[in-house]
Structure formats: C-alpha cells, structure tokens
Image (cartoon, rainbow, N blue to C red):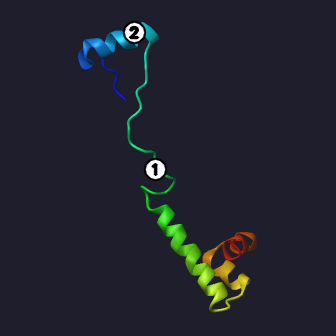
Amino acid sequence: MKYRNASEILPDELLKELQKYAPGEMLYVPSDNARKKWGELSGARTYYSQRNEEIRDKFSRLKVPLGTLCDEYGLSEDTVKSICYR
C-alpha cells in the first residue's frame, strides 16, 4: 500500500473537514470493493462444493459405503459423515 499526501488528492473543503476529526494523524481509507469469501478467487470454494456434492450423490443415490468414500477421497470418516449428513 502506498502512502499519499491528502492535500494532493482531496479537495480543500474535504481536507479541512478531515482535519477537524484527525489533525496530523495517518488514516487508512479502505477500498469500496466488497471482500470476497474464502476460496472465491482461487476456485477452491467451487472445487470443494462440487466434490462434496459428488460425495453426497455417491452415498445417497449409489449407496457407496462410507469407508469406500473415505479411501477414494482421502478423508476421515468423520469428515465424510459430516458431508453426507449435512
């Protein structure tokens, strides 16, 4: 993050108003972009959602045993149970 002098960026009226509240202090101005949820940028969220849906489908529709799903996906039995029974 780059620091910039407020007097170079802000209009005089706004700068004077800010100086009433925080004279001589450094302020952080957050961007207006909404924060993304975990895994949205990397695609991990989509990957795990699809994987979990696949596990639920195999368990409920195809009647694949929990132990087989654990081995196939490299997950603990508790994790597979939480995915299937959610």
So how many labels did they put on this image?
2
Find numbered disc 1 in the image and state the secondary structure of the residue it sits on. Answer: loop
User: Residue type at mark 2?
Assistant: Gln
Q: What's the mark number on residue 36?
A: 1
Would you say the residues marked 1 and 2 are in contact, meaning their CB atoms lie under 8 Å apart? no
Q: Is residue 26 above or below residue 61?
A: above
Nearer to the camera, 2 or 35: 35
Image position, residue 7 (x, y; %): 27, 13
Is tag 1's residue or tag 2's residue first in the polypeptide sequence? Answer: 2
Residue at 48 percent across and 66 percent down: it is: 46
- Asked whether residue 29 appears in the rendered view, the answer is yes
Q: Nearer the viewer, residue 70 or 8?
A: 8
Q: Residue furthest bottom?
A: 62
**Residue 22 in view, yes or no:** no
Residue labelled with disc 2: 19
Secondary structure of residue under mark 2: helix
Relative to 10, 68 lies left or right: right
Q: Nearer the viewer, residue 12 or 82?
A: 12
Where is residue 1? Give x, y as percent.
37, 29
Q: Is 5 situated left or right of 47 in this image?
A: left
In the image, residue 42 above or below residue 83? above
